[in-house]
Image (cartoon, rainbow, N blue to C red):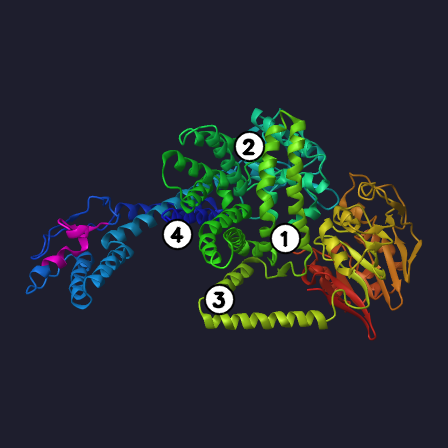
Amino acid sequence: MTHDLRLLAPALATWLAAAATIGLPGPLIYGLAATAAAASLYLLTTHRPLVSTSPSEGQAPLHRNADTPEHPGDSHELTPTHPPNGDPTWQTSAANSRHPQQSPARPKNGNQRDRHFAASRLGDVARGVGGGRFERSLRRLVPMARRAEGGGAGSGNGWRLLAGAALACAAASACGVALRTTAVGTGPARELARAGRFATAEAVVTGDPRARPGNGRPVIIIRARAEAVERTGVRVPVLLIASDPRWLRLIPSQRVRLRGRFVPPRGPGLLAAVVIVRGPPAVLGPPSAIQRAAEHVRARLRAAVARLPPDRRAVLPAMVVGDTSRLDPELAEEFRIAGLTHLLVVSGANLAIVIGAVLGLCRLAGLGRRRAPPVAVLAVCAFVVVARPEPSVLRATVMGLISLLALLTGRQRQGLPALAAAVLLLVLVDPELARSYGFALSALATAGLLVLAPPWHERLARRMPGPLAAALAVAAAAQAAVAPVLVMLSGEIGAVSVFANLLAAPAVAPATLLGALAAVTAPFSPPLARVIVWPAGLAVGWIIWVARTAASLPYATIPWTSGALGATTLLLGAGAAALALRSRRLRLLTAAAMTGVLIGVVALRVIAPSWPPPGWQMVACDVGQGDALALSAGPGQAVVVDAGPDPAPVDRCLRRLGVTDVPLMVLTHPHADHINGVSGVRHGRAVREVLITPRTSGREARRTSGLRVDPAETGRQWRVGDLTLSVLAPLTTGPALSPGDDGTTINNASVVLVARKPGFSALLAGDVELEAQRALEASVPRVQVLKVPHHGSRSQDPAFLAAAQASIALISVGARNDYGHPSGATLALLGRLHTQIHRTDREGDIAIARTRSGLVTVPRH
């Protein structure tokens, strides 16, 4: 399969220019854009003309082929005027065959005439050696060689034109970035951000509000366009960070008034400021009519799926219109591990299904080729409005519109040029897409389907049924194309993603089609929509089962180096594998090596102690930026102290430990990074009792409904088997916490525990900071293990840490977190105390096990 690659270089140049220049100073970007524009102008306005000469003796006159374009840089073919048998290449050979005593005069027009001379000589040799059959074979080979060579001087002009066009696109892209950089880098919004001042502003919401777990309360992130700052008119993009749940009710295109602190954005980007908003929004007007209609469709679809099981009613709107408002983070994490996250966002597959269905209906209605594409265009526009213009939706939309235009005009539809055109246009319009991982994943997956899937399908079809070969080729091609970016982001390779996609594929189209039909029907007939979503729910149920089953398999993901180094090593490994597959001997050696590695892994799995290690007493679960500890209380039992920020990580940690019964769960204080994962602890387990700080604000109640909840009062003890828990803090009940309290106040209300078992003791210090630590110095007992307070932050009292006299220090912290945890000062302090430091961001789950010689630490990674 051949592709027209002429648009590929301009598209890549546009993308790379935008990605490389975002974050640079405006004057430098303008300079780079001017340099690229000047180079482009030089290449596009200069070319090497073809030299025309008179025909040589014994040769037919040469002239330009009528089918050959006359523009500079196009491929020029010089053809004899009277080609025998319709073959222009061999006119000179025919003339020489009639006059064998004369040698053809060699033309003097460079490479172009050299090929004609070589062709005549090959004709003579062919007739002398092999007769007509060999001559006919050479007649087929010579034009192929001429086409591969590209037409001599014309080829040089072609490359100059291509390079000029690529530089022109790069210049336009850089110029667009420079204009936006200048716009966001000046004005009142950026001045307020540099000063870190509070101000009142009016803004228009440009994206759906999204809630994320934060330190103490959910963080709501809203993309918006500032229209006025302190009564000064502006028009610049800003990012709003709020905590009031009323922000979640906003719809794109609504205008609001807000007050907050303006701060500069972190890292390169095209934002004027980040605004830390205080309080709820003051809504100044309703959303636009189009957005009201889109939200009406989304709301009616949510109502239609309300009677489905919880997981299905969350996933179906996500698959159909990108509505993830009801999606459980635990389920989303299982989709990620299984490599099925792309099903939870609207992408090109959804749009292709919608376009195909609309065109099919148009054909059934008798609409011809001219009238069907405009109807499909209207359907695409409506779909984009309802699904929101996310990067993957935009890429798929532009490609779909280009394909529909080709269908309308009767031209050949080619996927790769359409993809290149979509990338080029979208990055020129919105340069920030060049740094969007979602956009990169969407474009790479599409490229994989267009370039890798066809040849892989052709090879697989020789060994398996056609439909299975097609499905496997599509899943493998998409996964291979996006693997470097996924490794860069997560530091993992999905070992089961191809097979998970293969199993889920049969249910994707029915779920999407029926879900889209329900979305169209719901505004007019809710009862009919409820009937339609029932079979769609069955298809979604199968997809959910596949995701959960794949995510629960051992080695579902394989750890890999993250970042650019991880992506580079993965590409090098893939290249080495491709080379190995080209040689039969190397294939055999690779297969033998892989078999040996597999046998070794299985042997280690059987011989080496499995996780958790025998005699484990405590495990610090790797839950990211948060806390979750498990204390062994017997076979299948554990006391859980805090639950982390998300349900999925703590659930996986307890599942790996074989914990099915939680006699006691302690939530040290009501911060999201300690309580938001409670549903993960409860998933498939019996939780009998919950302890909370006596000063609670009540934020734990929603997550502990139906459970027995008691305050952890100072001085009380709880015994579970041979495990004893003693409460050291909070020392005084004090006033109850309120939503307005700052983080330090809430941290200092943490429950502090001492855990003891025969041969094991630990101080679990929650997130207490300096004030609470100093109040506890006199009551801290000597222990073997210290859970360092507040993720190893700078707020540590040396006397408090020294009083514990612990030989092992555990720091539960997220990799590359925004808080700078753990602090270098804290690590240095622990080092001076001669304490072994272990961190979950580097070692994963960390177990403390009891052996004959004492306690040992066993990291899972």
- The residue carrying mark 2 is 385
The image quarter containing residue 286 is top right
The amino acid type, in three-letter code, at marker 2 is Val
The amino acid type, in three-letter code, at marker 3 is Ala
Which residue is at the front of the view, 861 or 176? 861
Residue 115 spot, x, y in % from top left: 20, 59
Residue 508 spot, x, y in % from top left: 59, 44
Q: Please report contact status of discs 2 and 4: CB closer than 8 Å, yes or no.
A: no
Identify the magenta region.
Answer: 76-95
- The residue carrying mark 3 is 576
Mark 1, secondary structure of its residue = helix
Please indicate whether residue 856 sits to the left or right of residue 326 in the image: right
**Pair 4/1: label in front:** 4
Q: Is residue 750 above or below residue 253?
A: below
**Marks 3 and 2, how far apart in space?**
45 Å
Label 4 environment density (alpha carbons within 10 Å; few <14, some 14–19, many ≥20): few
Q: Please report contact status of discs 4 and 1: CB closer than 8 Å, yes or no.
A: no
